[in-house]
Amino acid sequence: MTKMSQGDLFAAAAGAPKPVSPEIPDPDAIRTRLTAMLALVRDATKLPWEVPRARAQEHLFHNMAAWLPPDERDALRTAFVAEMNRLREIDGRA
C-alpha cells in the first residue's frame, strides 16, 4: 500500500493577499439615508411598507445608526421607533 502524504493546507495562502479590512461607512452618507427614512415615516399616514419589509427597515435603521455618535444615534433611533409605533397604531398592529 502506498502511503500518501498530506499537503500543507496553508501553502497556497502564503502568497495570497492579506484580507482587506472592512471600509468604515461615511457618517454623512449614513445620516442622509437615516434622515430620509425618518422623513418618510413622519410624513406617512400608514406603514409605507408591508409588515415584513417594515421589520427589515427597522433593523436596517437600527444597525446603520450604530455608525453615528451615541447622542445622535439614540435620538434618531428614538424618533424612528416612535414614528413606527404611531403607524402601527394607525394600522391596528400596535
Image (spheres, rainbow, N blue to C red):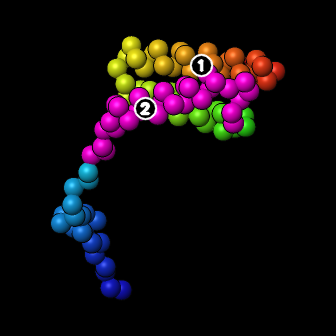
Instruction: Depth check: give the residue in front, 2 or 56.
Output: 56
Indicate whether 42 appears above or below 18.
above
Residue 58 in view? no
* Residue at image point 51% right, 20% down: 77
Indicate whether 79 appears above or below 20.
above
In the displayed structure image, the side of residue 81 where residue 72 appears, left or right: left
* Residue at image point 46% right, 34% down: 33
Q: Quadrant of residue 10?
A: bottom left
In the displayed structure image, the side of residue 81 where residue 62 appears, left or right: left
Residue 35 in view? yes
Q: Which one is earlier in the sequence, the residue at label 2 or at label 1?
A: 2
Q: Is residue 76 magenta?
A: no
**Circle 1 residue:** 81
Q: Is residue 35 magenta?
A: yes
In the displayed structure image, the side of residue 10 where residue 60 appears, left or right: right
State the residue lying farthest toward the front.
Answer: 43
Q: Position of residue 43 (x, y in %)?
A: 64, 24
Q: CA distance from mark 2 to mark 1?
A: 18 Å
**Amino acid type for the residue under numbered disc 1:** Val
Which quadrant, please, contains the C terminus?
top right
The local crowd at label 2, few if under 14, some if 14 to 19, many if 20 or more residues have their Cα within 10 Å, is few
Q: Quadrant of residue 83?
A: top right
**Circle 2 residue:** 32
**Amino acid type for the residue under numbered disc 2:** Thr
Q: Position of residue 73 (x, y in %)?
A: 42, 20
The local crowd at label 1, few if under 14, some if 14 to 19, many if 20 or more residues have their Cα within 10 Å, is some
Q: Is there a contact, CB below 8 Å, between mark 2 and mark 1?
A: no
At mark 1, the secondary structure is helix
At mark 2, the secondary structure is helix
Residue interval drawn in magenta: 21-49
